[in-house]
Amino acid sequence: MNKYTIDFSHSIIGFSVRHMMISRIHGTFESYNAEIVAANIEQMKDTHISFTIAVASVSTKNHDRDVHLVSPDFFDADIYPKIVFTSTSIDHLDDQNFAIHGDLTIKNITRPIVFKTVYTGNGVNPWAQEVFGFQAKAQIDRRDFNLVYNTLLETGGVLISDEIDIVIGLELNPL
């Protein structure tokens, strides 16, 4: 088994949500770590993935909104400081596409999730280190994790959609 580390300067854990049902707000988590081990990372053979994300590191490029997101109205980061994902199985769909099944825990609520994942290739960076790229996407219903804050709009509808799109881009280096 080989261990891999994330090149944080070339990786992202992001999300987006519809705002007022007319636009999208995008955000990232700036502090996270992972344990990734695999017999063959390119084919996701015997691979185990575990992520821990610091909730307080959320960034939507709007300070007031970020403070609100870590408050008890949303993530309640003082009580639930971490989001955790642990893979449970991986389906090999074809040469570059995988379905990574796992458990996502937010606010001590754990639900199954599937990330549609694409292996985007490998190469050698300018520092002679081998790198591997992956893109993963999933969608969750925030209500499943007790993220229920919302506001009704005078024009009808709600301020924030229930569906959250999660997008992860990783550049991995073997240890």
Image: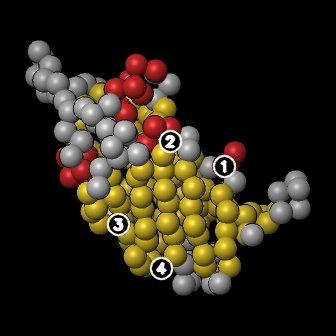
User: In the rendered view, does 141 fall on the left or right side of 37?
Assistant: left
| Residue 29 circle label | 2
* Tally of numbered tags: 4
The residue that disc 4 covers is 92
Closer to the chain start, of discs 1 and 4, is 1
The quadrant the C terminus occupies is: bottom right
| Residue 24 circle label | none
Q: Residue at x 37, y 34 (%)?
A: 70
Report if residue 99 is visible in the image: no
Please determine whether, in this image, residue 162 is positioned above or below residue 127: above
Please determine whether, in this image, residue 14 is positioned above or below residue 2: above
SS class, disc 1: helix
The residue that disc 1 covers is 8
Task: Report crowding for label 1: few under 14, some 14 to 19, many 20 or more residues within 10 A (C-alpha).
Answer: some
Closer to the chain start, of discs 4 and 3, is 4
SS class, disc 4: strand
Mark 4–mark 3 distance (CA, rounded to whole Å): 18 Å
Mark 2–mark 4 distance (CA, rounded to whole Å): 28 Å
Q: Residue at x 67, y 63 (%)?
A: 5
Q: Position of residue 130 (x, y in %)?
A: 79, 66
Query: Does the CB distance between marks 1 and 3 fall below 8 Å?
Result: no
The residue that disc 3 covers is 103
Q: Which label lies toward us, 4 or 3?
A: 3
Q: Which label lies toward us, 1 or 4?
A: 1
Q: Amino acid at mark 2?
A: Phe
Q: Position of residue 159 (x, y in %)?
A: 22, 26
The quadrant the N terminus occupies is: bottom right
